[in-house]
Image (cartoon, rainbow, N blue to C red):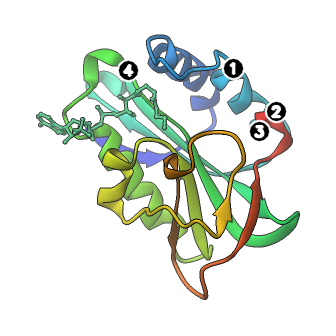
């Protein structure tokens, strides 16, 4: 299993990985693969990593795009979607994608938010901060990790591709 940055032809294969991963996810909107396509088209993907198994088969993917805080660019990213194909789960691939992704973006960004299960994301240092707000879902599912600088306060918005 290798984790590496997305390369040219991967863009054709990643949507299938995303839809395959989210097909059985209870919280899925069904739009996750389309969101990836829109972000690519808008050149709004900041980091995109794939997990590659034998025979160069892509079995997982993670994406980072810039979020705004109170409408401003603050050098903060949003992690998501994160996808691992059902057959390949519970072997650490999702965790490896998150860990490698955070390592890849840490130098150039000030922090990252994620909407997801705190039991999964907490191990990487993500925490809920009541001062950083994402309206809608239960607040504890919205978490952030600070790479540098003060922890920001405000309301987070994702790129328009997320709808
Ligand atoms: C969420 C998702 C990416 C996790 O991928 P994964 O490859 O299974 O992730 P990991 O293997 O790193 O960790 C998952 C669990 O397996 C456990 N695990 C990891 N390696 C393991 C191993 N060798 N043996 C048994 N369990 C293991 C982890 O401890 C973790 O446990 P948890 O359920 O208590 O959190 C995957 O389930 C998925 O694509 N889901 C659908 C889409 C989705 O929900 N994406 C996230 C949106 S926020």
* Mark 3 or mark 4, earlier in chain: 3
Q: Is disc 4 placed on a helix, strand or loop?
A: loop
Q: Is residue 21 above or below residue 94?
A: above
- Ligand 1's quadrant: top left
Reading the image, the residue beneath label 4 is: 85
**Residue 103 horizontal/vertical position (percent):** 43, 66
Residue 22 is situated, as x and y percent measured from the top left of the image, at 50, 19
Query: CB at mark 4 closer than 8 A to ligand 1?
Result: yes
Q: Position of residue 107 (x, y in %)?
A: 54, 77
User: Is there a contact, CB below 8 Å, between mark 2 and mark 3?
Assistant: no
Of the pair 147 and 142, the residue shown nearer to us: 142
The disc label shown at residue 12, or none? none
Residue under label 1, please give it: 31
Q: Earlier in the sequence, mark 1 or mark 2?
A: 1
Q: CA distance from mark 1 to mark 2?
A: 9 Å
Q: Are marks 4 and 2 in contact (CB under 8 Å)?
A: no
- Where is residue 160 drawn, in percent x and y? 85, 40
Task: Name the residue that disc number 3 marks.
Answer: 39
Q: Residue extending furthest bottom?
A: 149
Whole-angstrom CA distance, mark 3 to mark 1, is: 12 Å
x 64%, y 15%: residue: 30
The CA span between labels 3 and 4 is 21 Å
Point 82% across, 32% down: residue: 163
Pointer 1 local density, CA inside 10 Å: few below 14, some 14–19, many at least 20: some
């Amino acid at each position: 299993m290798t984790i590496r940055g997305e390369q040219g032809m991967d863009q054709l294969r990643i949507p299938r990985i995303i839809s395959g991963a989210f097909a059985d996810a209870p919280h899925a909107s069904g739009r996750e693969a389309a969101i990836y396509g829109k972000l690519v088209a808008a050149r709004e993907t900041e980091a995109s990593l794939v997990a590659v198994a034998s025979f160069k088969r892509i079995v997982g993917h993670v994406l980072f795009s810039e979020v705004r805080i109170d409408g401003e660019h603050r050098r903060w990213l949003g992690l998501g979607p994160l996808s691992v194909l059902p057959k390949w789960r519970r072997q650490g691939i999702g965790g490896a994608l998150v860990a490698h992704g955070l390592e890849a973006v840490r130098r150039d960004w000030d922090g990252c938010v994620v909407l997801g299960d705190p039991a999964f994301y907490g191990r990487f240092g993500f925490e809920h901060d009541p001062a950083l707000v994402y309206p809608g879902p239960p607040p504890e599912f919205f978490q952030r990790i600070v790479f540098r600088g003060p922890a920001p306060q405000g309301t987070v918005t994702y790129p328009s591709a997320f709808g």
